[in-house]
Amino acid sequence: MSLARGLSTAAHPDAAPDQAAQTDRSAHGASRSVARNGAAPACAFVIFGITGDLAARKLIPALYQLHVNGELDARTVIVGFGRKPLTDAELTGNLHEALAREVPDLDEGAWRSLAGRISYVHGDYASAEAFGRLAAALEDLDVAGRVYYTATPPGVYGAIARSLAGAGLARASEGRFSRLVVEKPFGTDAASAKALNEELLEYFSEQQLYRIDHYLAKETAQNLGVLRFANSMFEPFWNNRYIDHVQITMIEPMGVEGRGQFYEDAGILRDVFQNHLLQLLALIAMEPPVRFDARSMRDEKVKLFSAVACPNPQETVLGQYVAGNGMAGYRQEPGVDPRSRQATFAAMHLTVENWRWGGVPFYLRSGKRLEAKASEIVLQFKAPPHVPFTLPSPVRPDRLILRIVPDEGISIRFNGKRPGQRVELGRISLDFSYRESFDGAIPDAYETLLLDVMEGDATLFMRADEVEAQWAIIDPLLEYATAPGTTPLFYEAGGRGPKAAYALLESVGRSWKRPAGVKTD
Ligand code: BG6
């Protein structure tokens, strides 16, 4: 009997189903390890919501940097689309002002040559007439394809896709690719993410959709794959036989930065847990993919997410910052309800129910207005089975630390003998820093992502089933967080977060590693 008989014959989500996807098919199967070779294919890069914050802080600086690096083809143009009536000159004037804030050593000559390629179309996201004008602006360009970027509020993603299709801009034609980049948040729960997927998939094929999670394009996040799958020394201990638990921390000193209204709907669970933290968890816990390409990577991540049990709300700590250290509390932020129960902090315990990780807790925490900006992953080893020394206190556990922010790098902490006649233990650290070990600037995550879209590489983007699987893990917590009896614990702005988050680990004899950049007491 053939072993393959039981396998599903349903179409694979990364299989190119129609002509529109043909131009992207090879890219979805091409390995990311291939070095970039010169500039990306020439394209019309359309930014919906170009007058907004995301375009000013991330997209234009990234495109400017790519231009300076010679990675943008000379024929590539940027077309902004927005609801504000502006002339091309007004738009580029505003973008220049914002760019000068982001890039202190701005090369004015380079900016002028990029600005000369930026134009603006003004109109509503549901207006057939405005999209007709957009189509006319794109018509005779000598480019290999079009990239559409939704830097807008999520409520208009569907309208944009529909209007693009209505104007004949969604399908690839005459050998030109057509790709839609969808920013986070992608839905507000599993049901709305599914509905949004269905809506977008009416007009674009899966191969044309690039759902963003910028954490995946950070160098250390990408290096997790290289560390695990280009070395053989880590794999033997990467499992429940040697690892006691895993910690994933992402903390920030910033508050909601003028996004009070957005945060009232999102909260910390939707803003960073459903996406960034779960993606980091996937990179740590997934099985080795067959290839480092979109299909293999995403297949493995989806498999991993299906093994993650929903966190127990009773073991989840939700917090909200209150005024402290000269900073306002969350409830005083503009756009926030003065009685808001929205969480700006969460700490939780997740389990991965498979052979590799059964029995190993994964602790995740993240919060706004904490004492430092830090993102790191800690794999803590089990205690040695027997310690043959007489020591005043138990040996401290070995740790492998993967630092994403600040100072991207890797450290190994273990015990060593202090010099002297007695056996006394001291703590040793082996440290690797990206900046010190490799020459060259570390690209911003958005530079990597924009280039990937132009090249048709979806490895660092979310597939439909992946986003839905991530929401399925977080949904029960969202229900708990919004239930009438749930109130977040208050913590002081600029402080260490709710005490209960520490108790979560201390109650089982563990403790959070203090992240890099956080002052010792
Ligand atoms: C974004 C969140 O996705 O990630 C923000 O919406 C958060 O709230 C940001 O501050 C953190 O990203 P980074 O790259 O600054 O660590």
Image: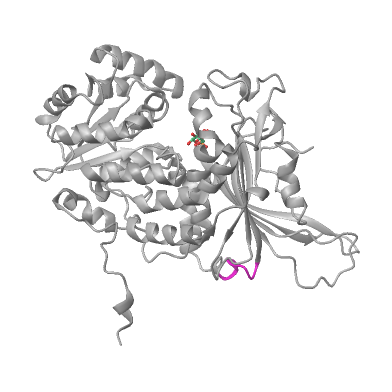
Quarter that holds the C terminus? top right
Up-down: is 139 above or below 214?
A: above
Residue 195 position in % (x across, y down): 34, 43
- Is 352 above or below relative to 344? below
Q: Residue at x 71, y 31 (%)?
A: 491
Considering the whole magenta stretch, tell me its main secondary structure. loop
Question: Looking at this view, is 418 or 272 the one in front?
Answer: 272
Q: Is residue 239 magenta?
A: yes
Residue 476 on image: x %, y %? 54, 48
The residue closer to the viewer here, 67 or 81, is 81
* In the image, farthest residue toward the front: 484
Q: Quadrant of residue 11?
A: bottom left
| Left-right relation of 151 to 221 | left
Q: Specify the farthest residue to the bottom.
A: 1
Q: Please tell me which residue is depicted at 80% across the width and 73% down the height of the picture.
A: 386
Examine the rendered structure and indicate whether residue 194 appears above or below residue 135: below
- Where residue 179 appears, as percent x and y from the top left, is 24, 41
Residue 516 located within the stretch drawn in magenta:
no
Q: How is the image coloured?
A: one colour
Tell whether 423 sits left or right of 187. Answer: right
Which quadrant holds residue 9?
A: bottom left
From what the image shows, is residue 398 above or below residue 339?
Answer: below
Report whether residue 73 is seen.
no
In-front residue for pair 188/499: 188
In-image side of 43 versus 90 (left or right): left
In the image, 132: left or right of 403? left
Residue appearing at x 82%, y 70% in the figure = 387
Quadrant of the drawing holding the N terminus: bottom left
Q: Which residues are magenta?
A: 236-242
